[in-house]
Image (cartoon, rainbow, N blue to C red):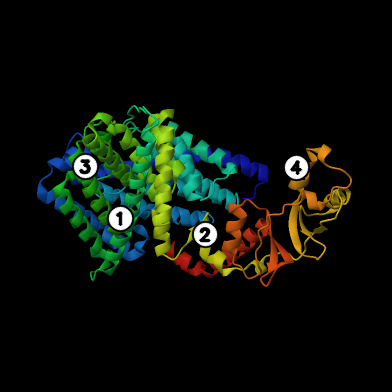
Amino acid sequence: MNLSRPTREALLLFFAILIGVLTSIGVLGFLALIALGQWLFWPGGENFLVQVSQAPWWLKLLVPALGGLLLGPVIALWGSEFRGPGVSEVIEAAALEDGYLPPRLTFLKTLCTALTIGTGGSVGREGPVAIIGSAIGSSLARFFNLGAEKVRVALACGAAAGIAATFNAPFAGTLFAVEIILGDIQIAYLGPVALSAFVAIIAAKYIWTGFPLLISPPFEFRQPGEIGLYLLLGLLGGLLAVLFTRAISASDTLYRKLPLPEWLKPALGGLALGLVGLWNPHVFGVGYTSINLALAGKLALDAALLILLVKFMATAICLGSMSGGIVGPSLFLGAMLGTGFALSINLVFPGWHLIPVDYALVGMAALVGGTTLGPITAILIIFDLTKDYRTIIPLIMSCVASLLTVKYLYGYSIYETKLLRRGVHLVRGRDVNILRALRVKDCMSKKIEILYDDTPLAEILGKAEKSPYTNFIVLDSREELSGVLTLADVRKDLRFPKELSAATTAEKLKTREVVTVTPDDDLETALNLLEDRHFPFLPVVLPHEPKKVVGLLKLEDLLTAYQQKLLKMRLRQLPEIMKRT
């Protein structure tokens, strides 16, 4: 079905609403599967923590192992992509598959995670809800032939709706989709993505009686001196995030190397989880009840630190061998870290009277920001929970400290780590392997518009009016690069006409600080320069003559070359993709 551009734009907004509603229904179905599993496998209780706490010891060992045994054939038949965080698959689909998610992946990932959590697995549920919403958005946009870019936006709409409905966090859902799924914050995406997130919240409140899941405690930011403590908490959160990510990767590596049949390995992971659960039942399930204990200030120092340790171990075991999400466990670990941090400070300095609940909230954001490298998303999850502006400064300080710590010590999010282990390296939503395979000479333009230092203003304006280009290379009298000039530079100077005269030349108007590339530089290097420094183009010079201009590299030409290379690669892989779907 071919539609005009205005119709596609209008349909996208309509679909944003529809995606939000359908995703809420899909999330409800996923939660019902989890509840069914918990009802089938565990004895009754007022909540899941009570259920597993009251269960006999043999059931704590048997049920997780049985869940792994049921999950094993899926992983053995369809591959290891069903292990670990599911958001990685959505990121890959947005970056490399034009927003397409195979129906098999959506169905089986949802089923596997519901089975994992239902039998007590220590994982989060945001992976499947992101996949469910993304699949709904992608399918609708593809059916109506809205184009590859609109499919990606619709996919992000679904991811935002899923996260928003799960955490009662519309702002966090929006930024999760744009910051983490798309990998690039663009204003054009925010409208439909935010619309889907808010619609999902409204729909969830009508169809889901258990909404929301986390309590909303008051927050008190009493004195500026606490900023240092929140920075320290962020540093500790970053360190814990690095250890957590590495532990999950090590667990995955260990299970891959075990000399056992593939279908049996998840059962071994379930049995290991049961052994940890015998030590402390807080490890079973997502852990919202345990988080609420921290947010209610009902945990002692020894309990918080013990729960932190066992949950760390249990989640690494489960994500290495089973299926699930990372945000829920990160919130859990962050709440325990923040509680333990505040109580430890109070123990050493009794007169400080820190409020553990405040530090639990900020610790939650620090861990999520560190594991996902999505600090804005992490901040907004907590802000959406508290609706208190006093949280903003502590959240920013802690999340920035956590982010910088992870960037310095490790460099990748948990999602990027999973993709890297599969040979996919994404930066800003693009495959670095493709960018590194292409050279500047593959897409640079040799048609360049030249001005000279002594070119007068009148001639510059005349040339700009007649030229199809908006970027000019400025050369000196020796025909060597001396600067660049864009129409934006000219317009900026025309705002101050008193400083200009007929004698004004390109020498006065040009930008002197010029960054260049050579024909043999790869496109990753060029893209980093273009996007980090917000340049519209880069002069291309000879490596042995850095002032000799031989071409011009524009951002749009670079992205076109990338998309063409990506398309050719996908066409070569089409037979394998068809087998997988």
Could you tell me which residue is drawn at 83 percent across and 63 percent down? 477
- Disc 2 from disc 3: Cα separation: 39 Å
- Disc 3 from disc 4: Cα separation: 67 Å
Q: Which residue is mark 3?
A: 39
Mark 4: few, some, or many residues within 10 Å (few <14, many ≥20)?
few
- Could you tell me if residue 67 is visible in this image? yes
Mark 3: few, some, or many residues within 10 Å (few <14, many ≥20)?
some
Identified by mark 1, the residue type is: Leu
Point out residue 312 in the picture as x, y percentages from the top left corner.
Answer: 26, 50
Q: Which residue is mark 1?
A: 319
- Which dot, 3 or 1, sits closer to the camera? 1
Could you tell me which residue is drawn at 34 percent across and 29 percent down? 216
**Tag 4's secondary structure?**
helix
Q: Which residue is mark 4?
A: 492
**Tag 1's secondary structure?**
helix
In the depicted view, which residue is nearer to us: 17 or 444? 444
Identified by mark 2, the residue type is: Leu
- Which dot, 1 or 4, sits closer to the camera? 4
- Could you tell me if residue 119 is visible in this image? no
Direction from residue 316 to residue 167 in the image, left or right = right
Direction from residue 514 to residue 278 in the image, left or right = left
Direction from residue 465 to residue 431 in the image, left or right = left
Could you tell which of marks 2 and 1 lies nearer the N-terminus?
2
- Disc 4 from disc 2: Cα separation: 39 Å
